[in-house]
Amino acid sequence: MATAQPSDDQPRHRDRTGVDLTNTMLLWTPDRAPWQDNPGMGQIGLVAWPPAVRTNPTIPMSWGACDSSVHKSSFAERRLMVASLLFQLMLRDRLSVDVVHRACWALDEYRYLLNEDVPMPTWQPRQGSFKVGT
């Protein structure tokens, strides 16, 4: 399997881009009851915090910069928080590994959790507005 090679605009594993949990929120809709009729079911996205516009009220879950515990934590502590959240996203909320990997790649804390041989996502997410159903 070929791995994606980084382009000049893609962060590498240990690059610090400034997109981290102190200025970014994760928004997602679980792929389980009671959200089975939600058009965004199984999706996750990143938005800058504080958001410039009100986020979509149909997105039931959020975490990151909106939580005071994140701002009180060191970078190393935030990496552990992200690791814990990853298990919840995939095991409890049934989001696919690929969806989570693509969405979280932009976060510094996430990339620092990964070994250098973990392939970069084939689609590079951009931080911005999360749109349900896209």
Image: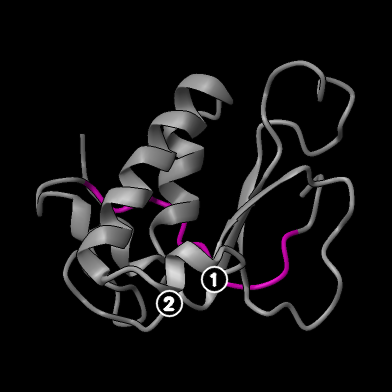
Q: Examine the structure image and report whether residue 129 is included in the region drawn in magenta.
A: yes
Image position, residue 40 (x, y; %): 78, 39
Judged left or right of residue 70, residue 54 is right
Q: Examine the structure image and report whether residue 120 is included in the region drawn in magenta.
A: yes
Point out the tag, 2 or 1, that comes first from the N-terminus: 2
Which residue appears at 33% of the width and 82% of the height?
A: 17
| Residue 27 drawn above or below residue 106 | above
Per the image, the residue denoted by label 1 is 24
Q: Amino acid at mark 1?
A: Thr
Which residue appears at 21% of the width and 76% of the height?
A: 15
Per the image, the residue denoted by label 2 is 19
Of residue 125 and residue 76, the one placed in the foreground of this image is: 76
* Residue 21 visible somewhere in the drawing: no
The residue segment tinted magenta is 119-130
Image position, residue 85 (x, y; %): 43, 41
**CB under 8 Å between callouts 2 and 1?**
yes
Determine the residue located farthest toward the top in the rendered image: 33
**Quarter containing the N terminus:** top left
As helix, strand or loop, the secondary structure at mark 1 comes to strand
Q: Quadrant of residue 75?
A: bottom left
Judged left or right of residue 26, residue 21 is left
Q: Residues within 10 Å of mark 1 (few under 14, many from 20)?
A: many
